[in-house]
Amino acid sequence: MNEPVLSLRNVSKAFTLHAQEQRVEGCRDVTFDLAPGEFVGITGRSGSGKSTVLKLIYRTYLPQAGEMRYASEAFGSIDLARADERTVLALRRQEIGYVSQFLRVVPRTTAREVVESAMRETGTDPSAARAEAERLLEHFELPKALWESFPQTFSGGEKLRVNVARAMIKRPRILLLDEPTASLDAHSKSKVRALLASLKTEGTTMLGIFHDLAFMEGVCDRELHMEAGILS
Ligand SMILES: Nc1ncnc2c1ncn2[C@@H]1O[C@H](COP(=O)(O)OP(=O)(O)OP(=O)(O)O)[C@@H](O)[C@H]1O
Ligand SMILES: [Mg+2]
C-alpha cells in the first residue's frame, strides 16, 4: 500500500459569531486519507462543511482539533494543523493548489500575467512560464483579445477559466477544487474535465467539491459525502 499523501484525523472547526455569541459548526471529526494520484470528490448539501474542509487543508482556516498529516516534497511529513505560516506559504507556492468558488482578482494584472506569475512563483524561467500560460489560456479558449485585459470585467465563466488555469499551471502535488465548474457552460466544463483528467494522468492528487459529480465520472475515483459537518 502506498503511504497517503494526506491524512486527516478528527479534524474539527467551529466558528464563533461574535455579534450573536453563537457557535456555528463547520466540520467535526473529519477523518480520511488521500492516496497518491487519487481524485476524491466531496458532495453534500449547501452548508454541510465541504468548503470548510478544503480551506482547512489550504490553511485558510486553522482547525481547533485534529491532525492533517501531509507528505511534503520539500519538508517531509508535516502536520498542516500545526505548520507555521512560512511553511504554509511555501507549500502554497510549490505543492498545494486551490481553486476557489470565487475568483480573487489582483488589481492591474492581466489575465496572462495572473496565470504566468503563478508559474514564476515556482522558479520557472520567464519565457517558459509565458509559453505555458499561453498554452493554458488557449486550452481554455479564453479569447486572445482578453489575454492582455484585466479580469475585473470578465464574465463569471471567463474569470473562472483564468482561475483554473492559474491553479493548474503549477502542476501542484495536491489540487483542491471548490466547485471549479459551477458557473461554466457545458463546453467549458468539458475543457476543465479534460485538463483534470490529464493532471490525474500526471499523478496529481485531487480533492474536489463538485455539484455535479456525475460529470466527473471516469476521472473521480471515490466520493466522500458530508452531512451537517460530518463526513461519511
Ligand atoms: N468564515 C466563517 N465564519 C463563520 N461561519 C462560517 C465560516 N465559514 C463557514 N462557515 C459556516 O460553516 C458551515 C459550513 O460552511 P461551508 O462553506 O463549509 O459549506 P459548504 O458545504 O461548502 O456549502 P456550499 O455548498 O453552499 O458552498 C456553514 O454553516 C457556514 O455558515
Ligand atoms: Mg462551499
Image (cartoon, grey):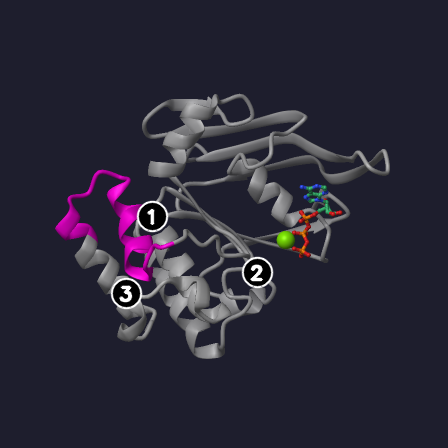
Residue at the spot of label 3:
148
Tag 2: amino acid: Phe
Residue at the spot of label 2:
210
Label 3 secondary element: loop
Task: Tell me where the magenta segment starts and ends, as one range.
Answer: 108-129
Q: Nearer the viewer, residue 58 or 209?
A: 58
Kindly report the secondary structure that dominates the magenta region of the rendered protein.
Answer: helix
Residue at the spot of label 1:
203
Residue 193: image quadrant is: bottom left
Give the numbered dot on residue 23: none
Tag 1: amino acid: Gly
Q: Are marks 1 and 2 in contact (CB under 8 Å)?
A: no
Q: Is residue 51 magenta?
A: no
Could you classify mark 3 by the number of other residues whose Cα lies within 10 Å: few (under 14), some (14-19), or many (20 or more)?
few
Which of marks 3 and 1 precedes in the sequence? 3
Label 2 secondary element: loop
Q: Is residue 124 magenta?
A: yes
Q: Nearer the viewer, residue 99 or 19?
A: 19
Relative height, residue 174 to residue 160 (above, below): above
Residue 211: image quadrant is: bottom right
Instruction: Estimate the spatial distance between the alpha carbons at disc 1 and disc 3, rounded to whole Å.
Output: 32 Å
Quadrant of the frame with the N terminus = top left
Q: Position of residue 82 (x, y in %)?
A: 54, 21
Residue drawn 69% across and 32% down? 12
Q: Is residue 154 left or right of residue 29?
A: left
Q: Nearer the viewer, residue 49 or 132?
A: 132
Tag 3: amino acid: Glu
Relative height, residue 172 to residue 22 (above, below): below
Q: Position of residue 141 (x, y in %)?
A: 32, 73
Residue drawn 43% across and 78% down? 187
Residue drawn 56% across and 68% down? 214
Which of marks 2 and 1 precedes in the sequence? 1
